[in-house]
């Protein structure tokens, strides 16, 4: 199938497909005599996997690692487990940091609500930020 057909079948754009090719996520397709790309049917499944990986918060580098393992003929299950476990740990850390930030913002907001503008020094712009 041509690049436009692949893009339509996967809900992506031709530009994204070219980027994935250049990034090594999609293998270079065969070319017709007129230079058009001819994608195999498995390109749809591969693009679907890339989309699902991105939705899971994986980087393109992480997705490439999984694809490389699969392309080498091995099942990437253990690698995927380790990658997703690391992602969960990262998210837990981000959540903890966001909870701390939220508390700090609430404190600043509450102090700003009760502020007396006449006590604000112009050179500090605003002491609550």
Image (tube, rainbow, N blue to C red):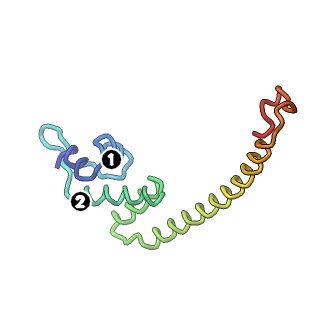
Badge 1 marks a residue whose secondary structure is helix
Which residue of the protein is positioned furthest toward the left in this rendering? 33
Q: Earlier in the sequence, mark 1 or mark 2?
A: 1
Pick whichever, 71 or 16, lies toward us. Answer: 16
Q: Residues within 10 Å of mark 2 (few under 14, many from 20)?
A: few
Above-or-below relation of 22 to 86: above
Q: Residue 6: where, in percent of width, then height?
A: 22, 49
Q: Residue 54: where, in percent of width, then height?
A: 43, 55
Q: Quadrant of residue 35?
A: top left
Q: Residues within 10 Å of mark 1 (few under 14, many from 20)?
A: some
Q: Which mark is residue 108?
A: none
Pick whichever, 128 or 98, lies toward us. Answer: 128
If the image is split into quadrants, where does the C terminus sit? top right
Badge 2 marks a residue whose secondary structure is helix
C-alpha span from label 1 to label 2: 14 Å
Task: Please tell me which residue is depicted at 87% across the width and 33% down the height of the picture.
Answer: 119
Task: Please tell me which residue is depicted at 48% across the width and 71% down the height of the picture.
Answer: 81
Q: Which residue is mark 2?
A: 42
Q: Residue 115: where, in percent of width, then height?
A: 81, 39
Q: Which residue is mark 1?
A: 21
């Amino acid at each position: 199938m041509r690049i436009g057909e692949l893009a339509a079948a996967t809900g992506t754009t031709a530009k994204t497909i070219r980027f994935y090719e250049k990034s090594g996520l999609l293998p270079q397709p065969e070319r017709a005599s007129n230079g058009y790309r001819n994608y195999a049917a498995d390109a749809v499944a591969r693009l679907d996997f890339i989309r699902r990986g991105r939705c899971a918060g994986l980087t393109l580098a992480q997705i490439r690692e999984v694809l490389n393992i699969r392309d080498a003929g091995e099942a990437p299950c253990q690698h995927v487990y380790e990658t997703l476990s690391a992602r969960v740990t990262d998210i837990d850390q981000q959540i903890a940091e966001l909870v701390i930030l939220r508390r700090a913002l609430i404190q600043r907001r509450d102090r700003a609500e009760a502020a007396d503008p006449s006590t604000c020094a112009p050179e500090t712009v605003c002491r609550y930020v």
